[in-house]
Every structure is written in structure tokens, then in C-alpha cells.
Image (cartoon, grey):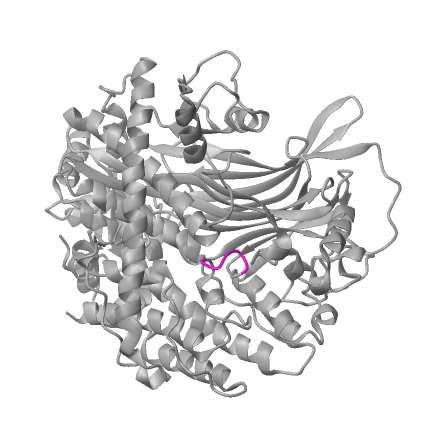
Amino acid sequence: MPSRLRRVRWLAGLAVLLAGGLAPARAQQPAGGEWVDTYVAAAELIRREVLRPDRCPHDPAAVVLTVGRDPQALARYVREQVAYEPQAGCVRGPQATLAARAGGDWDRAALLAALLGEAGHQARFRVVVRTPAQRQAVVDGFLAQPGRERLVFGRPSASVPPPPPSELLARCGVAPQNRTILAAQSLARWQRLIDEAYDAASVEAEWIGQALRSAGQALAAPSAEAWYAQLLTGASERVVVELYGGQVLDVSPEAEPLPAAQARQGRAFADVPANRLARLTLRLWMHVAGEGAPPKPVLLLERPLVLGPLFGQPIRLEVVPADAQAVAQPPAGWSDRQWYEHVKRFEKFQAVLCVGPAWEASKVFDLAGQLHDVAADGRIESAQDVGAAVNRGFGGLFGGGEPEAPPATRLESLVLEVELDVPARAPVRQQRLLVSDLRPGVSPVYHADLLASAGPISPASMAWMMVEAMADNAPILAQVVQSDDPGRFSQAPPATRVSRLLHEWQLARYALTERLLADEPALTPLAGPMLALWTTQLVVDDAAGEVTGRAALDVVWDELLLAPRRPADAARAFERNVRLGVASTVFESLLVRDIRPPAGMRGALAEATLFQLKGEPPVVRPPGADGPLQAAPLAAWAIARNETGRLLVLPGHEAPESWWSLNPATGATIGRGDAGEGQSAIEYLKITKMNLDNLKCFLGFTAGALQGQGSSAATSWLQCVTGANATGAMGAAGSSMQLSAGLASQGTLIGLLADSLTIMSAIQEAGEK
């Protein structure tokens, strides 16, 4: 096991701090705005002493600062500190490979090339195709190595002591006496959730297994060919790095380096070729229905993205109202009836996609399915520029002008499509139905925060991103809260978001995998891409005359698998993958329940339990089965578009709305429901009682709407731009800066920063041992 991984394993307790969201330290609040100054000063201290350039766990420049510029030393670092996984192409890239501490031939070579570039050396790639015998030897060597360490996590349990308080806490103005107690509380919460998910999954996975056996599915003896075909394909290319000058550096998993003469015979590439890069593409489609004509698809937004770097970039898709009446009155004081009246009248909308600091906007579309031209800066042309320059480019999302005569068409549906394209594999797609006749009353007003990752994200990297976000946002908080300038909202730089809720689910997957691997020496983990969304929508209830909200945790892909080390263990791997997928499903439900305990839960687990209590037998639909599917209309829509080649287990015969989706070759399981979205949803919460503030945020972006509203306006604005408006457990950066009356205290702000500081200090200590 690489020595770096040994040092990272004991960070399990620290990961819990990140995931658990510790309660604030109790401290007396300074008078006036001094707590803001204290917070900003603490953030600056942490940036100077903790967020040092040589400490970032996923930055190639930090490695060079620590290891030095010698090419041989950098190659040795990659060989010893980054585990090997047979994987075709460059799926993770340099930063994500560092975050995962593992990668394939292309990923490890790309990491070495990035390190050499930071050290001032020019290099290129040489690719040699392995023979079948060489591929088999590489795969056999991979399967013989310990697997748990590649999760870069460790196994959290009640026996893991919480880390000691950082010595910097006192310098930040925080008494550290209660930090250990709070860390223990957070660790206990995490352990409780993991235990509950694991226990529930044991029961549900057995129920799924019985359903498959009753239906005659070959659960007992699945073929091992799919496992080894994927691994052998991943090991097909041996990639070395050649310095301009002739020196060849080999970080391949083979015991002996490739002879330089043989390496130079390989095909040369100045950079990673496009067909070796994993990509994620987001598309937003509008389907327009006319009289007597089938719906016509219209592409509103399309964005292809290289998958590797996305783990550190917050992604948000928003569909916002673009009507002039949307800003006719500041929404902070709207009554329930006013919310209903305003949202019901929205007719024009615009989609905005943010990836890190970059953003792009679609044309404006309306409920009639018509498009309206938009200027380069996002404004509806010839429309009133209500929100110019707000939040660096979000201005102009609200239009004006007189409405045109309605055409004889209508917006039939609004569909979000995501596509994953990984080298040596066929592209896979998933669609989500946002608006249609199948979802009555749902408004196009929508937002989704996305977490896309090509592999494991270590607790060290997540802690770093959280601390960095809070340090980045501290000056923004001070400017928004303390300044009297009405333009302070439009002049503030973009805030940094960290999707805490989604990261917590991602950590849980690895913790549950650790639990399953503890007594499974015959299996080893394979961590592939994942994509999860936290979504919110507005629902117009005409009968009640009010607007409600809907929030869902939607796991689109989850390619963390347990692979058999030997063909004889394929059936065991299948069964354990079913259990892992169900446990992840259960954990999603527990997360959402933790956030909103009174809310009604929906999803695969909830409906399956209901049918089991009723004694209703499940329905197994094998891949390629013909005949009508007895499912709810929305479920049938999603299954028809998303589940080709999958094995489905539906809870019962009475038109179920959710199902378990299994890969028939590996047993990889994911729960789905409603419009195809993932395992957990909260339905129909009153928007005025939620911590979403979606529409307030969108409509309150203009200086005119926010001017004179004081801290409540600052709260809405800050929560929106940081992502904290999604839930109390999401947006770690934003959660640390909420300005509501119960949270505006030195104890909360500095306390949350101190939790992150404790994590980062322990990471530093681990790196020095």
C-alpha cells in the first residue's frame, strides 16, 4: 500500500467532520459588526497558514513544491503515491487523479506530465499497445493488490477518536474546549446513518434477490466476462512520458520500466488526444407541440465538459423567470396568495448554466414554445434591462416589452439530458422530465446543483475545497453586510459554492463500500464516474391557490462497483453490488429525512416497503422484455428512455412510480422514480416555509429590489450565490455565512470555520509524518 495512502486512511474521523456539519461552538457574540471582522480575520489567518500553496492535496503545483523539480523524483512520486487501476483513456485528469490517489495508464501519465510542466520541463506522451498476455499480467497484478486503500477514505467507526482541536483556534478567537465533544457527536451521527443504511439494505437486497430468483433470473451464476473485459480494455495501452531531450519516464504498473528504445517506437502525442478524454454533456431540450403535429425538439442549451476537472467546480443549472412582472414588487414580503398569483403568470423563462466562474445563458423561451433573441450579455433584446451586471452576468434575465399574440403552439415538455462519454465505452444518457402534462402544475422555474466526479474524492480534497470556499467568501460577506452602497450586491465578486449535501452522499458510498469489503477479501473496488443532482422546482397548486416546492436528491450515475478477484466470485460480487446500491439509496433517504424530518418521502425504498407491507409481489422485467409495462405514466416515460438493457425490479403490479434498476452483468443497482430521477424526494413543501428561497433569490438579484431590505436581503442574496439556499446541510461555504437572526453569531461562523481548520491541520500533520 502506498505510504501516502497509509497516512490518509486515518482521516476517516475528519471526513465525518466534513460530512456531519458540527453544531456551532457557543461563544459570546461581539457587539455590532465585530463578529464579521473577527470572521474575516480568521479566514485570512487560515488562508495564510493553512491554505498554503504546498498543501493542496489535488494541485500538481503543490506536489512540485514538496517533491522538487527533478523528473525522476516526480516519476517516483506518481509510482509510489498513486495506485494503479486498469482504466481506458484519461478519465480523471491530473487533479482528480491526485484527489483519488489512483488512476489508469493515461491518468497517471497525464499527472506526471502536469507535474513536469509545473517543474518547467516539456514532455510528450508515447503510447505502446500491450499484447494480450501483457494486459492479462497487468490485470492479474491489479486484482492481487489490496483494494480498500484505493477508496482513499478509511473506515469510520465509533472507535475512531475525533481529531484534537487545532492550536490555531485560540488565535481565531474560539475557545477549543468543546470541539472534541462536538466532533464526537458528529461522528456518532455519521455512524448511526451508516448503520441504518447498511441494516436496511441487507433486508431490501434479500427481497430483490428473492424476486430475481423467483423470476428465473440467473442471479446465482452471472458471467465473469463483463468484469474482465472492462479491465483488459483498460489495460490495453501503456503510456510513458518522454522529455524533450530524450529521457523516458515510465509510471506504468509493470515491475520493469519500458526500455527507452521500445518506448520511442510508440505513437507520440503532444497532449492527451480528444478521443482519450472522458466527457460529460448537458443539454436542455424544449419540445413544442402544434395543432395536429408531433412535438418538435428544440435545443435550448448544450455544454460538453471534460469530466476530470469537474469534481472541484460547482455546477448549477437554473431556469429563471424572464417576465417584467417578476420584479414588479420585491418578493420578500409576498403573501401566499401573491406568490401564487405571480408564479402562475410567469410566461417567459431563460436557462443559465454555471460551471465554476463561467456561465452561459440560453435564448428566452415561453410557454407557447417560442424563442426570443438574447443579446451577448444575456439580455432579452429590446427588453428592459432590469438587473444589469448583477452577480457578474446574471443581469438581464428579466425581460420587458409588450407580449405578442399567442401562436398556435405550446411548450409540450422541458427535458434535461445528461450524457457520459468514457473512452472505450458506448456513451450513456439519462433524461429528466422537468415540465410536461405528466407533471401538472410544475413551473419551469427550476434549479439543480450538480456534483460530477470521475472517481473518489478524498476527504482531504473535500476539506480543502470547503475551507477555501469559506476563506474566499469571507470578504464578500463583509462587503454585503457592512456596506451602505446600494450597488454592493452587483459589485461583489462571484461567491464560491461547495455542494455539501452531495459530497456527504459521496462520502457515504465509500464508507458503505468499506463496510462491505471488511469481510469480503474476494472482492475489490472499482470506482467509476458519478453524477448526482440536488434539484428544486416550484409547483402551482390551483386548487389551494398557493405555490409549493419540490426538492429531490437525484443520483444519475453511480459507478462504484465491487469486482471479483476470481471468476468463481462473480455471483458474490453481483449480490454485494445489489446491497451496495440499495444501501446508497437508503442513505439518500436518510440524508433528506435528516434535513426535513416532517416531509413525506418518495422513492424506490419507500414504495418497495409499502408494497411489501401490503403483500404485493414485485414485478421483474428482464432486459429486452416486450409487452406493456404496468407503471405510472411518469415512470413509464422515464423507463422507456433511460433503462435500455437494464434489469428492473418494480415494487408491485399496481402501477408503481419507482423501481430498482440493475446492471444484469455486474449487479450494480440504483433506485429510480418519478421522472427518472433518483432515490429520494421531498414533495409539496410550502415554499414560504422552506430554506430554498429560490424565487426570492432569482427575483431579488437587482439592486433596486434589494436596496433598503437590510440583513434579510443579504441573507437571500448570499444564500443563493453560495448554494446554501438549497438546504441547511448543503453549501458548506454558504451555510457558514447565513445571516439569519439565529445564526449571526461569532460562535456559529467561527465555529464552522474551526471545524474545517481542524480537518486541514490534521491533514498537514498526516502529510508530515
**Which segment did they paint magenta?**
725-729
Of 183 and 37, which appears nearest the observer? 183
Q: State whether the magenta stretch is mostly helix, strand or loop.
A: loop
Please tell me in which quadrant of the rendered image residue 410 appears: top right
Picture layout, residue 138 above or below residue 381 = above
Q: Is residue 77 among the parts visible in the rendering?
A: yes
481 sits to left or right of 83: right
Q: Is residue 55 among the parts visible in the rendering?
A: no
Which image quarter is the C terminus in? bottom left
Please tell me in which quadrant of the rendered image residue 329 appears: bottom right
42 sits to left or right of 232: right
* Residue 718, image x, y percentages: 57, 68
Q: Residue at x 22, y 40 (%)?
A: 516
Q: Is residue 166 magenta?
A: no
* Residue 337, image x, y percentages: 75, 52
Picture layout, residue 754 above or below residue 337 = below
Q: Residue at x 41, y 78 (%)?
A: 43
* Residue 302, image x, y percentages: 59, 44
504 sits to left or right of 133: right
Q: Residue at x 30, y 21 (%)?
A: 210
Q: Is residue 728 magenta?
A: yes
Toward the front, the furthest residue is 614
Picture layout, residue 241 above or below residue 750 = above
Please tell me in which quadrant of the rendered image residue 719 appears: bottom right
* Residue 229, image x, y percentages: 26, 28
Of 486 and 88, which appears nearest the observer? 486
